[in-house]
Image: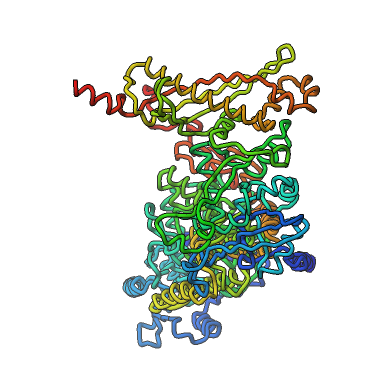
Amino acid sequence: MKKITGIIVLLLACSLISGCWNRIELNELSIVSATSFDFNGNKWVNSYQVIIPSAISSGTGLAGGGGSQSPVTVFSTEGRTIREAVGKSSMETPRQMFFAHNSAIIISEEVARHGINEILDLHYRNTDARETVSILITQGNARSILERLVHTEKIPGQGIRGILSNESRNTSIVPSVMLYELAMAISSDGKGAVIPEIVFAGNDEDGRSLDVLKKTYEQAKLRIGRLAVMRGDKFAGWLTREEGLGVSFIANKVRSSNLAFRCKPGDKTYNMTFRLQTSATKLKPTLRNGKMTMGIDIKGAGYLLESNCVTDLTQPAAVKQLEQQLQEEVKQMVIRSWEAAKRLKVDVFGFADAVHRKYPREWRRVKNNWEETFSKIQIEPHIKISMDRVGLTSKTFKSSNSDNAR
Amino acid sequence: MDIFNNQESKGQSANGVNNNKTEGSQNNASGEKQAQLISSDLQSNLDMLHTRLGKSPDIVIRRLGDPADGMNRNSQQFALVYVDGLVNGASVNELIAELSKQTERDMNKLQNGEKFYQFLKNHALAAGGVTETDQEDKVLLSIFNGNVVVLVDGCATSLLADMAGGNLRSVEEPSSQTVIRGPKDGFTESLRTNTSLIRRKIKSPDLRIDAKVIGTQTKTNIAVVYLKGVAKEEIVQEIHRRLDSIQIDGVLEGAYIEEFIQDAKITVFPTMINTERPDAASAGILEGQVVIIVDGSPFVLLMPVTFFKFFQSSEDYYQRYDISTFLRMIRYVSFLVSMLLPSLYIAITTFHQEMLPTTLLIGLAAQRDGVPFPALLEALLMEMTFEVLREAGVRMPRVIGPAISIVGALVLGQAAVQAGLVSGAMVIVVSFTAIANFVIPAINMAIAARLTRFLLMLLGATLGLFGIISGLMFLLIHMASLRSFGFPYMAPLAPLSYNSLKDIFIRVPWWKMNTRPEAATDNIARQENAGQSNPSDHPSNS
């Protein structure tokens, strides 16, 4: 009995001596919803978008209110290293910074040109910051992105992430890139990576005040822009949105997208829309007489969304013809993005990995000179997209009208 | 077995209820001091009763045939002694009338005491169960067990006529374990009623009821009920051994006995089930469990049991097996919830905020804004509040019940949140914990969860999830080490027995329940055609 009491006392003492060293109450946390990295001379300027919980959730008791209060506050700290700057934040905020719920990192183009190695390193080194945070790039000041409010989402950081994931799921023009994906791409054989751009459209003074939420329209808004291409951890150049979709096709990152195409080869305007539902890409490198060819097999399926063209879609031949038009459209897209990548000399498609896998011996020879080899590759796109359904009506209104006229 | 016989007969004489069995003084229980015998003189016997019982008004001594009353002086003197309220008044009246009539008629034949005694014993005593004894202590005990003692002048033995009666609660629906479908009868405070309720359900000649008397002052009657051939012989013997070693002045409820005979003395987990339901007791007996009934309490004890027995309710077997399985899952989940939810809440909100979805985290953080106490204190405050409310609800008079529930629900719940003393989420956590606790069918298991909850809260608040997991590991090791009458508490999971799993997490249909759980029996075949399928399957259908 004495023994048992002794053991219990010891156990209790154990739990108390430890002193709850890393215990922290919820109301002692500064929950960061987005961070940005800028450069000022050779100093890092970190900005944090900190959530004010009582302004978002009405709460109860003493902490009532909300509504008229801004849901977030943004502040910046400066330091020679990133974590030095973070450390300085304790001089400005009464609560401890909490990065586990950070949903987006915005880096400025200047930081990207300097290199993002430090950012990757600290996310992998520390437990509090997650690697699953979305990463975006912006021209100009990154902090100003954090200051903008997003309609329909209370927390702008989550709003940014929401825009990105919605876009990549439904349009696939610009892929959603999480920090770990970026790190993987940078450390892959091709060392090429892409980061989506976020731009602020509108008057610079707009979008910072709660007044923006009082209108039914947004004069100033955040939107996804182009695609930044990284060579290693450094910025290499920009790709347009159209080139971006081509990159997504080659890199097998298309989930679903709306594709506009022409009904007949000679049509001046785009008059059909196709909803791509599934798409898979296989890269098949072949080495013949020292020349590298890259077969790009894209297989996809979907249905017709919109048609402004007089064709009889009840005929399989007509559908076949539409498929061919569509494939031609995608092929052009692929070729254009390939040209763009060649221009930047960055392997954003993952060609290097495909070559490494198929020709490990030759890879050793070319890997030091991969940029050169890459720009000499011939590509052979083979696109097979099947139109599974044409929608509820097989004819367009135009064709049915002309039937009546006759 | 010899021991059993001895105990059996000893118990019967003590009860004074087992019929038509004359008992001499040869069955003196060993270890008692030399028994006082009654004398052949009626007056000295009555004097003895006066001295030993005092002048309690409820003890009735009715002398008949006393020549001092001016009756025929040849008449035989005798006396009836009983306790008013413990005997059936109408029967006693009838007995006295009958005796007067018969002795009047046959007076001349019955001149001496011995003859009169034999006459009473064989003809005149209008009672179902008549026993005789010549020991003072047994006479006294039988009076308190509801017997009418007949003392005859000139005879050194007495007749004990069983007339037990008086006011007792009738068989009612159990208040603590109600079912929607199933038998509605419940045990009462009367031991005899309770054994009869079991007898009514199990009409097997193998059903054994061993009687015992425990308590130096209360002399409480105890019955050990089991099914011979199904219950393990060594468990029955062990129970008898443990019961015999109890030395206490009084037993007022089965709980007294439970604490004496349980295997582990220091544990929060019960190793015996108590029930108010004859069907639950009978089901246990059919599975080889032993039932202990204590006179004066409607709760009977079932043993041996495993941990999982506490999550089985009678109704599981009366409703269809699919819903029973579902409900059983809910009970296990509720047990974990009622044990873990507050500690998990504390640990996650103070150590592992990254585990919460962002929106939830913000909501919780907003609620905590302005709450002055740390999460642990907040939780303890609310838990204690609920425990106080609960205790008040059990103890207070029914009339003021509604007042307390209004105060509890409104003032302590809503107002505490509005006053900023606790966060709304904490109220939800504590209330759900409390509700989940009531889902566990066995109250004593619910109490185990209630107590361990506080320990885990402390661990969660000091060491986070690591502390909770350590606490759970400790609990698991402790539970695995428990035994109920020698049988592992965590069986059939540890040690694993696939055969007994059919009534643990799921409740298989009755036609598949062809074996008994191995906890309490070696005789596991439950159905004649064990292993065959649903009897409704017609051979031609297959």
Instruction: Determine which quarter of the picture holds residue A387.
Output: top left
Q: Position of residue B234 (x, y in %)?
A: 64, 49
Q: Position of residue A103 (x, y in %)?
A: 60, 51
Q: Position of residue A402 (x, y in %)?
A: 23, 23
Q: Is residue A321 above or below residue B182?
A: above
Q: Is residue B7 above or below residue B117?
A: above
Point out the residue furthest to the top here.
A289
Q: Is residue B87 above or below residue A301?
A: below
Q: Is residue B379 above or below residue A392?
A: below
In front of the other: A200 or A84: A200
The reply to whether residue A288 is in sight is yes
Instruction: Determine which quarter of the picture holds residue A240.
Output: top right
**Direction from residue A5 to residue A154 in the image, left or right:** left
Q: Position of residue B384 (x, y in %)?
A: 56, 72
Q: Residue at x 74, y 19 (%)?
A: A359
In front of the other: A143 or B356: A143
